[in-house]
Image (cartoon, rainbow, N blue to C red):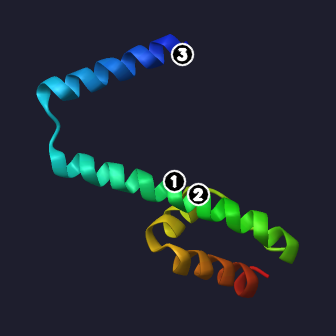
Amino acid sequence: MDSTVIVISMVVLIAILLIVGAPLKPMRFVAQSGVKLVIGVLFLFFFNVFGASLGLHLPINIFTAVITGFLGIPGLASLAAMHIFIFG
């Protein structure tokens, strides 16, 4: 798709949401989930950067990002423990 089509469709979608009004609770949940997902990806990225010297690598995919994003540092630690002890 052309980038102008994507930008125009996003502007139209935002305009429709502003005119019609979106339910506040579901939109807040979607926004918070998106932020947690991005935070999970960042945690995994920095773990891979610093864990490379120790020989640790966790793949960055939707499963690991969701676990790390919603559980935070304990989720990252549990993924690292599973990587070390179960998957070898």
Q: Position of residue 70 (x, y in %)?
A: 44, 68
> Where 35 falls versus 57 (above or below)?
above
Foreground residue among 19 and 62: 19
Q: Position of residue 29 (x, y in %)?
A: 28, 54
Mark 1 belongs to which amino acid? Answer: Val
Chain-order first, disc 1 or disc 3: 3
Residue at the disc numbered 3 = 3
Classed neighbour count for the residue bearing mark 1: other residues with Cα under 10 Å, few (<14), some (14–19), many (≥20): some
Q: Give the left or right position of residue 36, taking residue 49 as reference.
A: left
Q: Secondary structure at mark 2?
A: helix
Identified at 71% across, 78% down, the residue is: 83
Q: How far apart are the alpha carbons under marks 2 and 3? A: 25 Å
Identified at 30% across, 18% down, the residue is: 12
The answer to whether the residue labelled 1 contacts the one labelled 3, judged by CB atoms less than 8 Å apart, is no
Residue at the disc numbered 1 = 38
The answer to whether the residue labelled 1 contacts the one labelled 2, judged by CB atoms less than 8 Å apart, is yes
Chain-order first, disc 2 or disc 3: 3
Quadrant housing residue 36: bottom left
Classed neighbour count for the residue bearing mark 2: other residues with Cα under 10 Å, few (<14), some (14–19), many (≥20): many
Quadrant housing residue 51: bottom right
Q: Secondary structure at mark 1?
A: helix
Mark 2 belongs to which amino acid? Answer: Val
Q: How far apart are the alpha carbons under marks 1 and 3? A: 23 Å
The N terminus, quarter of image: top right
The C terminus, quarter of image: bottom right
Q: Give the left or right position of residue 51, taking residue 19 as reference.
A: right
Q: Give the left or right position of residue 76, taking residue 88 as reference.
A: left
Label number found at residue 41: 2
> Where 66 falls versus 82 (above or below)?
above
